[in-house]
């Protein structure tokens, strides 16, 4: 059923795609009221300096972006490489190319902003690295298979999708390649003391430590991916180096820089993050 709906959306021309998205956003916000309380609570606590009207404006724009993201993800079923490339521009791919020429593998760390799915489909255009993406296996096996097929790049082999639980082992096996590995690291982890905890948007927040731990173990450079929405269906990608040599970084420094990059991006683009996610469901007073 999901595949059929996605395919019908994929057939929709861009001239009509965002008209449909506006209808879905209206229904999701006003009728279904999908996670309205979660979104409002996240926004109010993250931007205490903003007025109620400002919060509502961000809130409504978020739902519009959220539906655009859904429509654009479905559209991947029919988009050709040259078509998708017209919608995503890379501001400074020379940063990744420089790392490649130096013989450095790299983690490209992107938050849930812009359209991370489209970035995953096009990241091979930014450098000559062997690209891959770390993903978390979905509980529904049929939907998991569907999303993996949808996320595959246009010209790469099956090894590009790496399940999170086997990521380190898989990358160790590929140590002789120059890899560029996509990792989304702003989800909420288990909320235990061993997570990385820091202040984020005015709240004590836990983060997966995997990005820093794997970077140090594998000796990968770390680059932040800022994917900014320039208009409906139009995105620009800017790379920002967090560290070239992780071995020189103090404990927690890579994670702290990544968090600060995410925070600055959200403050500059407040409607372009996944506010429907229950990001602050844990507190530090939990089991060790």
Image (cartoon, rainbow, N blue to C red):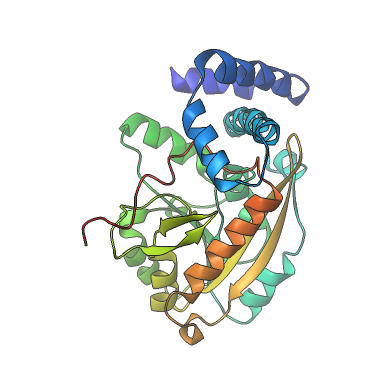
Name the residue at 70% across, 31% down: 53
Left or right, 119 with reference to 234: left
- Which residue extends farthest left? 287
Residue 8 point in image, percent of width and height:
58, 17
Residue depicted at 63% across the width and 34% down the height = 62
Q: Position of residue 269 (x, y in %)?
A: 69, 47
* Residue 69 left/right relative to 286: right
Count of number-bearing discs? 0
- Of the 4 image quadrants, the one containing the N terminus is top left
State the image coordinates of residue 108 (x, y, percent, origin top left). 56, 62
Left or right: 263 in relation to 38: right
Percent x, y of residue 273 = 59, 44
**In the image, residue 220 above or below residue 18:** below
Q: Is residue 60 above or below residue 201?
A: above
- Residue 26 seen in this snapshot: yes
Task: Identify the residue at image location x=74%, y=26%.
Answer: 14
Q: Is residue 148 above or below residue 196?
A: above
Locate the C terminus and report the quarter of the image it occupies. Answer: bottom left
Occupied quadrant, residue 221: bottom right
Is 138 or 27 nearer to us in this picture?
A: 27
Q: Nearer the viewer, residue 146 or 264?
A: 264
* In the displayed structure image, the side of residue 63 where residue 255 appears, left or right: left
Query: Which residue appears farthest toward the top when viewing the image?
Result: 31
Query: Quadrant location of residue 23?
Result: top right
Q: Is residue 130 visible?
A: no
């Amino acid at each position: 059923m999901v595949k059929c709906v996605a395919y019908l959306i994929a057939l929709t021309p861009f001239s009509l795609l965002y008209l449909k998205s506006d209808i879905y956003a209206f229904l999701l916000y006003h009728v279904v009221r999908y996670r309205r309380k979660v979104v409002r609570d996240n926004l109010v606590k993250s931007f205490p300096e903003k007025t109620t009207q400002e919060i509502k404006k961000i809130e409504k724009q978020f739902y519009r972006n959220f539906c655009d993201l859904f429509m654009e993800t479905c559209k991947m079923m029919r988009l050709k490489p040259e078509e998708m490339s017209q919608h995503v521009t890379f501001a400074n791919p020379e940063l990744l190319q420089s790392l490649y020429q130096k013989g450095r593998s790299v983690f490209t760390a992107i938050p849930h902003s812009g359209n991370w799915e489209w970035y995953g489909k096009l990241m091979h255009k930014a450098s000559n690295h062997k690209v891959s993406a770390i993903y978390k296996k979905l509980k529904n096996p049929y939907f998991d298979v569907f999303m993996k097929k949808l996320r595959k790049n246009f010209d790469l082999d099956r090894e590009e999708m790496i399940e999170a639980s086997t990521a380190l082992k898989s990358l160790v096996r590929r140590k002789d390649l120059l890899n560029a590995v996509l990792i989304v690291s702003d989800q909420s982890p288990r909320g235990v003391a061993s997570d990385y905890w820091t202040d984020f948007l005015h709240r004590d927040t836990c983060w997966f430590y995997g990005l820093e731990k794997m970077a140090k173990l594998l000796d990968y450079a770390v680059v932040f991916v800022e994917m900014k929405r320039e208009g409906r269906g139009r995105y620009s990608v800017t790379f920002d180096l967090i560290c070239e040599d992780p071995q020189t970084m103090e404990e927690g420094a890579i994670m702290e820089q990544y968090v600060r990059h995410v925070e600055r991006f959200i403050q500059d683009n407040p409607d372009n993050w996944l506010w429907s996610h229950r990001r602050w469901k844990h507190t530090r007073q939990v089991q060790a």
